[in-house]
Amino acid sequence: MKAKLNNKFWSAAWGGCVTVAALLLSSGPASGQSSKLSKDLQSLPSGTPVNVVIQYYNPPTSTDTNYASSVGATPGKALGLIKGNGYAAMSPTAATKLVSLDTNVKYVSVDRKLQMASVTSNDSAMNTSVSANLARGIGYDGTGVGVAVIDSGVNATPDLGVPGSTKSRIVYSANFDPSASTTSDLFGHGTHVASIIAGNATSSLCSNCDINYYGVAPNANIINLRALDANGQATDSTVIAAIQQAIALKSQYNIRVINLSLGRGIFESYKLDPLCQAVEQAWQAGIVVVVAAGNYGRDNFNNNSGYGTITAPGNDPYVITVGAMKDMGTYSTTDDQIATYSSKGPTMDDQVVKPDLVAPGNLIIADLASTSDTLYASYPANLVPVSTYVTSNTSNISSTYYMLSGTSMAAPVVTAAAALLIQQNPAITPDQVKARLMLTASKTFPAYSSWTDPATGITYNEQYDIFTVGAGYVNVYNALTGTAMAPSNVGAALSPTAAYDYTTGQVYLVNGSSVVWGSSVVWGSSVVWGTSVVWGTNTSGQSVVWGSSVVWGTSTNSGFSVVWGTSVVWGASNSQAMTIAVKGEK
């Protein structure tokens, strides 16, 4: 679905709690729109039933429940640790009345739809590209670390088992999708993601197998939190509930990383977006959150050349947001290129510098969930030939491995890298993991690359600036052998924001309260990302930030306001700006 841009909606920061509600919009918005009602909620046509998420400054009490009942609301569902009651059958006029009556209500937004961030389209090349094979060589494989995969479910494949045993390393499963009661992967996305994280290559370790499809952390445990339905879709409230369950189970299963290979459009500042606030709660609880950047990098709908297309919650400055590289099917990284579909920063509304890192995400081979899942039914040709990894076997198609592409596949590479760092140093904090991975990322890229889509004939030209590749190409071995340690406090590694100087026509970075990018003795005294130790000295990546690059041009260009304007946000008026599906690139 094509994302469109609407007016920007500013509001206050997050307070305390969230509930989910179903509102029946039986009349148009009341005159004088409220800053406590999201723009997409206020703009819905009359008579449209819609679920919403209600945020409170403080945990709601019976008084808040009474206020909601007094304007005609009926109960919905609560969202775990983000406490509160849900409501239904409320018109925009009633919603406006509720926020005027109840001063504890912070913000009311649509319970928006999300979708996986994969595309429908070899591996050991993936492992080698990020030096994961070297990590195994020095003894790090994710042992003891729990990784929560919030996705379409994870099936118990041989590669996710315990070698020499019938036990699975999927140590916990729960379902949050209201459309089904199973924890199995009906779509076929979550199993693939989990295999990239923790697959142990059991199915490709035969005597005549010449390629082994290892995940990056092949002995990590998987916590399967099924939120996406059989079509790879979910809503904010479903994903938030899964995030809250991961937080609740953190100690029991040593959950130290959450993988979110999903996203949706941006409708307001991350400070108010309920999905962003949920991932921040996980971060503050000591869990690293890794998010796919999105697959909108080819989108030139507003002459923005794919810039400003990061999806939520990847727009949050706490989380590690990951873009996709093409490993070109080779073991060397010298020929690797950015995937043209990989979403680019800065983020809408807040202009946060994203992505933070890039990782292999194109034509990635990992576990097939089953031949009855939706992805397989739609794209059976994505099953890989056995000859891909078995010597002298050219006639059969594998029933085990499947190929997918997208930032959905890049995110779990970084998720697994985080798990390895945590195995090495259990006391490491999410901020320290993020900073180490960014610091040690490989920073050598070409200045430009291009790819022509054979189906359309369109050529996409890529520039390797920080809004395309972030701090660089994740390097697991460099991260594990590095010694620098950022401050441990929450928020120490917040991604900075970018700003446009109208007097000089240049873009500069605002570091805010983040101490990692400031004058820390660990990270150097430079506050300029382009020349700091975090970003390296690759001059090819600085032209967009510091120069008057043709990518940004001037404020008179038609695409300028899409990225730097003060009156735009992502998303269609019906609140369903989903991640697009594209094919992998060869």
Image: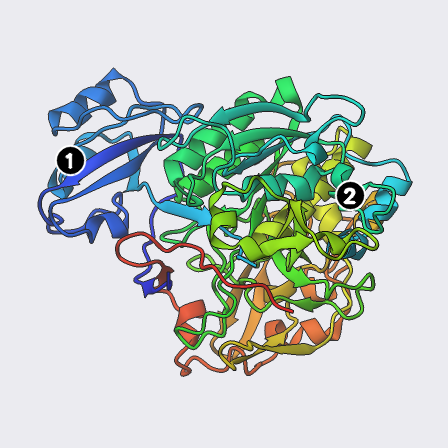
Residue furthest front in the image? 395
The amino acid type, in three-letter code, at marker 1 is: Met
- Which circle, 2 or 1, is nearer the viewer? 2
Residue visible at 31% across and 62% down in the picture: 6
Secondary structure at badge 1 equals loop
Residue furthest left in the image? 27
Residue nearer the viewer, 520 or 193: 193
Residue 285 visible somewhere in the drawing: no
In the picture of the structure, the residue carrying the numbered disc 2 is 204
**Residue 183 percent coordinates (x, y):** 49, 28
Residue visible at 30% across and 39% down in the picture: 107
Q: Residues within 10 Å of mark 2 (few under 14, many from 20)?
A: many
Describe residue 168's horizontal placement relative to residue 233 as left or right.
right
Residue 90 image-quadrant placement: top left
Quadrant for the C terminus, please: bottom right
Report the colour scheme: rainbow
Q: How many marks?
A: 2
Residue nearer the viewer, 231 or 57: 231
Looking at the image, is 307 positioned above or below residue 492? below
**Residue 144 percent coordinates (x, y):** 75, 25
In the picture of the structure, the residue carrying the numbered disc 1 is 90
